[in-house]
Image (cartoon, helix red, strand yellow):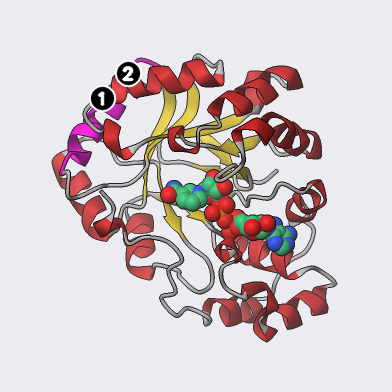
Amino acid sequence: MQQVTLNDGKTIPQLGFGVFKVDPAETERIVSDALEVGYRHIDTAAIYRNEEGVGRAIAASGIPRDELFITTKLWNDRHGDADRAIEESLEKLGLDRVDLYLVHWPSPKQDRYIEAWRALEGIRARGLATSIGVSNFLKHHLDRLLAETDTVPVLDQLELHPYHQQPATTSFARANGIAIEAWGPLGQNKYPLLELDAITSIASAHGRTPAQTVLRWHLQSGNIVFPKTVSRERMLENFQVFDFELSADEVASITALEREGRVSSNPDEVD
Ligand code: NAD
């Protein structure tokens, strides 16, 4: 598995498995399947309400803890209460630390993300999270965080797919040593991304599926990704993306699909 080195010296597997909208009752089975397929990086969040299932799958797998990379996130109504929120998440996960803890959204109307970030600095210092980062922070949120606090987030987890690439935020982040995680890497199937000629033609040229082609574009663009699926077949398909390479022209033609096509909320408007 290809690893990305973060600004705190730790590494993260560039491909993982996401569990947004995975039914809590099904999570243990689905994450167990993903671990069997070979995924070692799991992305969950308190708000997904499936941390227990992730924890049960980890415990049942017998995989040594240091071979796994587990991310969870602080929900928006806990910006003033992160110390308790991380303890609750760890208890549900059955872990004594996560590899990565993120502020899930900046929730600028609450104006408490600086306070939340300072709490995450303490959580990291206490060893409850090895690395800390943010999610859905746009350039201006990052700008303020860098100006007002002492720790640069290791990464920013953003909605990012060929139709919505957020160049202003990603170039600012990368210039400041902040890695990029792409959530909704396949556009959450809300756009016919996987049917576009620009993608299917490249897929056919490589004898690959459109999903593998889009994931490969992410990897070659430097993004960390964790596509979600409940199907074991697709888990396998999405995992087989390290044995082919797109040309620079192919990468550029997928990048050219950008059209500010957000599928989810504008972070400035989420409470
Ligand atoms: P995604 O882009 O991974 O799309 C998931 C959809 O794509 C599902 O409907 C699935 O059936 C389909 N799919 C998966 N593999 C496929 C394949 N090989 N062929 C065809 N269709 C396929 O969207 P996502 O789940 O929103 O994003 C991935 C992860 O990102 C989430 O599970 C979660 O961990 C994270 N996430 C984070 C935030 C955030 O605010 N930080 C928001 C949403 C998601």
In this rendering, would 142 be left or right of 155? left
Which residue occupies the foreground of this view, 254 or 24? 24
The circle on residue 84 is 2
Give the percent coordinates (x, y) of residue 245. Answer: 73, 66
Main secondary-structure element of the magenta-colored stretch:
helix
Q: Quadrant of residue 25?
A: top right
C-alpha span from label 2 to label 1: 6 Å
Is the C-beta separation of discs 2 and 1 under 8 Å?
A: yes
Q: Say which element carries label 2.
A: helix
Question: Within 8 Å: ligand 1 and the Cβ of disc 1?
Answer: no
Which residue occupies the foreground of this view, 142 or 30? 30
Vertical relation: 162 (above or below) 70:
below
> In this orientation, does residue 128 appear?
no
Residue bearing mark 1 = 81
Label 1 crowding class (10 Å Cα cut-off): few <14, some 14-19, many 20+? some
- Type of amino acid under label 1: Asp
Vertical relation: 29 (above or below) 202:
above
Quarter placement of the N terminus: top right
Q: Residue at x 42, y 31 (%)?
A: 131
In this rendering, would 76 be left or right of 185? left
> In this orientation, does residue 30 appear?
yes
Q: Which residue is outermost to the bottom?
A: 197
Q: Residue at x 47, y 19 (%)?
A: 90
Q: How many marks?
A: 2
> For the magenta stretch, what is the residue range?
111-127
Task: Give yes or no for residue 113 being in the magenta stretch.
Answer: yes
Give the percent coordinates (x, y) of residue 159. Answer: 45, 59
Q: Residue at x 60, y 48 (%)?
A: 226
- Type of amino acid under label 2: Arg
Q: Residue at x 74, y 57 (%)?
A: 241
Task: Give yes or no for residue 227 being in the magenta stretch.
Answer: no
Vertical relation: 118 (above or below) 166:
above
